[in-house]
Image (spheres, rainbow, N blue to C red):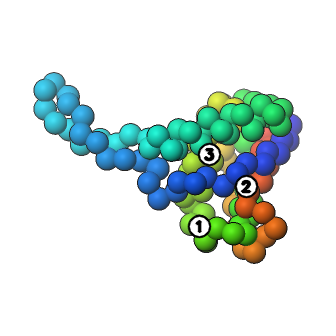
Amino acid sequence: MKTQIQLPIPILLNKLYIPVIKYVNGKPTPGIRKNPEAKKYQDLVKIYAIKQKTKLIKGKVSFKMDILINKRKDYDIDAVEKLALDSLEGIAYTNDKNIVEKISRKHLKSKDDKLIIEIEELK
């Protein structure tokens, strides 16, 4: 099975996680939490996935992503990857640990700002 989904490029990339202090047994302990803007993006991805009839793949997965950039400034591929991979977990594949092949390409001066992701079940 192969599926393709088009998504907007996430607004937030450099601050995916926010440092926080948690209290464990009454002692302050450093930790991190996901930025609320990242959570909003994940919710948006769910809406796009439903509209595009994305099907869940339960086996091993090949993940290919094209980052099309027009108006926005250049992005680090790994920042876009992390949020896209996390956002599609449970929607396009059961867990991102099932991804055994990953290809990401960035295209500057494209017509639109968007992500085009192709996910294929591997036998």
Q: Is residue 14 left or right of residue 68?
A: left
Residue located at (73% from left, 61% from top): 113
- Position of residue 43 relative to residue 79, above or below, is above
Q: CA distance from mark 2 to mark 3?
A: 12 Å
- Position of residue 6 relative to residue 33, above or below, is below
Dot 2 or dot 1: first in sequence order is: 1
Q: Position of residue 56 (x, y in %)?
A: 75, 30
Dot 3 or dot 1: first in sequence order is: 1
- Position of residue 117 relative to residue 48, above or below, is below
Residue located at (20% from left, 28% from top): 24
Quadrant the N terminus occupies = top right
Callout 3: helix, strand or loop?
Answer: helix
Residue found at the very far right of the displayed protein: 1
Disc 1 residue type (three-letter): Tyr
Q: Which mark is residue 85?
A: 3
Disc 2 residue type (three-letter): Leu
Callout 2: helix, strand or loop?
Answer: strand
Which of label 2 and label 3 is nearer to you? 2
Residue located at (56% from left, 51% from top): 82
Residue found at the very far front of the displayed protein: 71
- Position of residue 101 relative to residue 2, above or below, is below
**Relative to the observer, which residue lies in front, 51 or 4?**
51
Q: Position of residue 57 (x, y in %)?
A: 75, 32
Q: Which residue is mark 2?
A: 115
User: From this viewpoint, is residue 57 visible?
Assistant: no
Q: Position of residue 86 (x, y in %)?
A: 58, 42
Number of on-image labels: 3
Q: Which residue is mark 1?
A: 75
Q: Is residue 73 left or right of residue 108?
A: left
Tell me the quarter of the picture where residue 2 sits.
top right
